[in-house]
Structure formats: structure tokens, C-alpha cells
Image: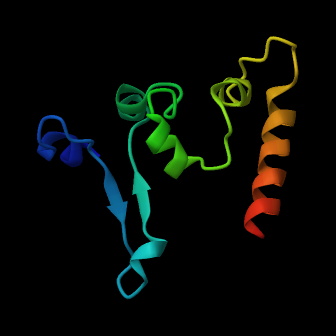
Amino acid sequence: MGQARRNAPQNRLPVVILHQHGSRATNDVVCLRLGDWLDWFGDDPLAAATPEELAILAPDWEDAEEHAALNGDTPDGTDEMELLAEYNASYRELTGE
């Protein structure tokens, strides 16, 4: 990780990719420091996403209110884990996964 941080050009996210020789690249593991993640994406990586980016990254999120609720900003005190479970169930239902 130190080597990745030293060698990463400015304005680039330093990552380490673990690859087992002979395996598919889709099985690789990507590692980065949590501090670097937070510097790049903040506590909520979708908070700064444009509507177009949200349509790609989270196509079944209908509005910012639901987005805020899923991130724990629930004015009615609803448990955010319960909301996340509902979101995941809805996603699986929509995608057939």
C-alpha cells in the first residue's frame, strides 16, 4: 500500500490489486485505505453524484429523500438497517437476482 501511495500520480486514487496468477481478473481484490476512500468519496459516495450518475449507479433510487433515508438520515426514526434490507429486497425483486 505504501508503494501504491508513493507511486500514485497526484489526483489519482492509490489502490492495490491482488491477482492470483491464472485466475480471472474479475476475481481480483482491490484494496485501498479507508482514509483515501473518505478523501475521494466522503462518507456517502453517492451524495455528490449527479442525477445522471445516480441513474447509472443506483437506477432504482427514485429520489433524494429515499437516498437520505438509506444513509441514516431518517427524520421519523426508522431504523436505517431495516430500510437497507427493504431496499435490497426491492432491488433483488426488480433485477431477478
Name the spot of residue 70 as percent of width and height, x first.
72, 31
The image shows residue 41, relative to residue 12, as above or below, that is above
Q: Nearer the viewer, residue 86 or 60?
A: 60
Query: In the figure, is residue 73 to the left or right of 48?
Result: right
Please report the residue visible at 78 percent of the width from the left and 44 percent of the height from the top.
Answer: 87
Left or right: residue 66 versus residue 38 is right
Give the residue displayed 35% in from the left and 31% down from the top. Answer: 40
Image spot of residue 7 (x, y percent)? 12, 46
On the image, the x and y values in percent for residue 19 come to 37, 72
Q: Quadrant of the C terminus?
A: bottom right
Q: Residue at x 32, y 54 (%)?
A: 16
Q: Quadrant of residue 28?
A: bottom left
Q: Estimate the x, y position of residue 4 in percent, counting from the top left.
A: 22, 48
Asked whether 66 or 81 is in front, the reply is 66
Work out whether 24 lies above or below 62: below
Q: Where is residue 11, by image quadrant?
A: top left
Q: How is the image coloured?
A: rainbow
Q: Nearer the viewer, residue 97 or 21?
A: 97
As displayed, is residue 32 above or below residue 94? above
Give the farthest residue toward the top.
Answer: 75
Image-based side of 92 in relation to 23, left or right: right
* Quarter occupied by residue 68: top right
- Extreme residue in the bottom direction: 22
Q: How many marks?
A: 0
Please report the residue visible at 31 percent of the width from the left and 49 percent of the height from the top: 15
